[in-house]
Image (cartoon, rainbow, N blue to C red):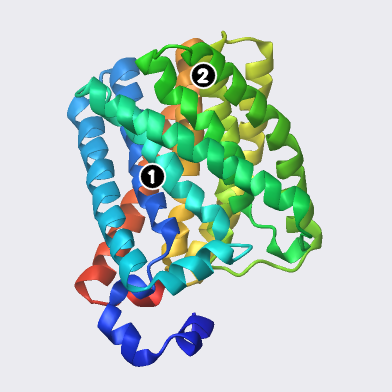
Amino acid sequence: MAEIIEIVDRKKIREIGFVHFMSISTFSASMGYCGMCFGWRMAHELWGAPAIIGEFFGACALLLYILILVRYIQKWKLDFDTVRAEWNSPTKINFFGTFNVSTVLLAAVTAPYNYTLACIFWYAGMILIMVFSWILLKHWLYDDQILRTVTPAWLLAVLGPITIPVAGNVLKQPGFHDISVFCVAIGIILGIPVIALLFTHSIFAKHMPDSVQPSLMILMAPFGMGYITYTSTFQPDTFTQLFINAGIFMFWPVVLKILHVMKTSDFRMSWWACSFPTMAFVNGLLHYCQDYPVIWVKILSGGLLLFGTGLILYLSFKTLNAVFNRTLWKLY
């Protein structure tokens, strides 16, 4: 943050206002609410939870997406140098994937209400995700990489493609099955080495700042979204059971570490990075509960749905509190 203030004249910052500090990763908030929408829709289907809960969270996701998009376009117009610096940053460029993923997720949110709008979101999101994933892959292969620049956000290149079938299998556009198979293949091929790299970095590299550590929850997203994508494209099988159970094993140390960071440090907007991955894993468990309705899966999936909802509502409260106190810019 200090580097940005040194580069840009303070008078210019005052003229531009809050959007100078706003990060593209703010779209994580919309992603989190999309995840809550899907989770509570599943809870309605499985246990008869009030349908309005999921639809309310879906409306919040769409509203947040529009508000953040308008503000970021404003930043693009008024402070393009900062946007370009964010794109050129080896650590921040990955978070442009949050815009792409939130776009494709909104296709599933809006599908029950407006099929045409959902298709627009899906095609736009699919194109953005694939182009962005190719750009990142080219960057990894062609440019020298430094271990300290490796962050959990690298998984967004994997998470993006495996979210495409979530809405694609609902909309059933021409060729959707082939697209889904293609996306599952990308998730498997890229997911395994990137997750291994992130574990290596977490164990042997320099300790990540507390403001970034909640993004470790991104490690859980491929297990949840991967289960949903794989089973909706093919069928539940032993492989998917292994997949979701590996996620259950990993979930507890990751979430305990993140909760410790949240308890011992001040709130930052970067904490929103843990919102969708949490709900992605919860949604994977809910689908697992639908496929294998045994008592322990029901208890675990229901409990984690409440946990994920509470986490996002807590992040929302802290964010709204900063908005009302006009201190939101300090949290980036």
Residue type, mark 1 in image: Gly
| Badge 2 amino acid | Tyr
Relative horizontal placement of residue 310, taking residue 324 as reference (left or right): right
Q: Which quarter of the picture shows residue 59? A: top left
> What kind of element bears circle 2?
helix
Task: Tell me the residue at 66%/35% (across/down).
Answer: 249
Q: Which residue position holds label 1?
A: 32
* Residue at the spot of label 2: 288
In the image, residue 20 sits, relative to residue 249, either above or below, namely below
Q: Judge whether 258 appears above or below 129 on screen.
A: below
Can residue 134 be seen by looking at this rendering? yes
Marks 2/1: CA–CA distance:
20 Å
Going from N to C along the chain, the mark reached first, 2 or 1, is 1
* Rendered location of residue 309, percent (x, y): 35, 42
User: Where residue 122 sits in the image (x, y, percent)?
Assistant: 38, 29
Q: Going 59% across and 34% down the picture, which residue do you hit?
A: 222
Disc 2: CA contacts within 10 A as few (<14), some (14-19) or many (>=20):
many
Which residue is rendered at x = 44% and y = 38% of the image?
A: 279
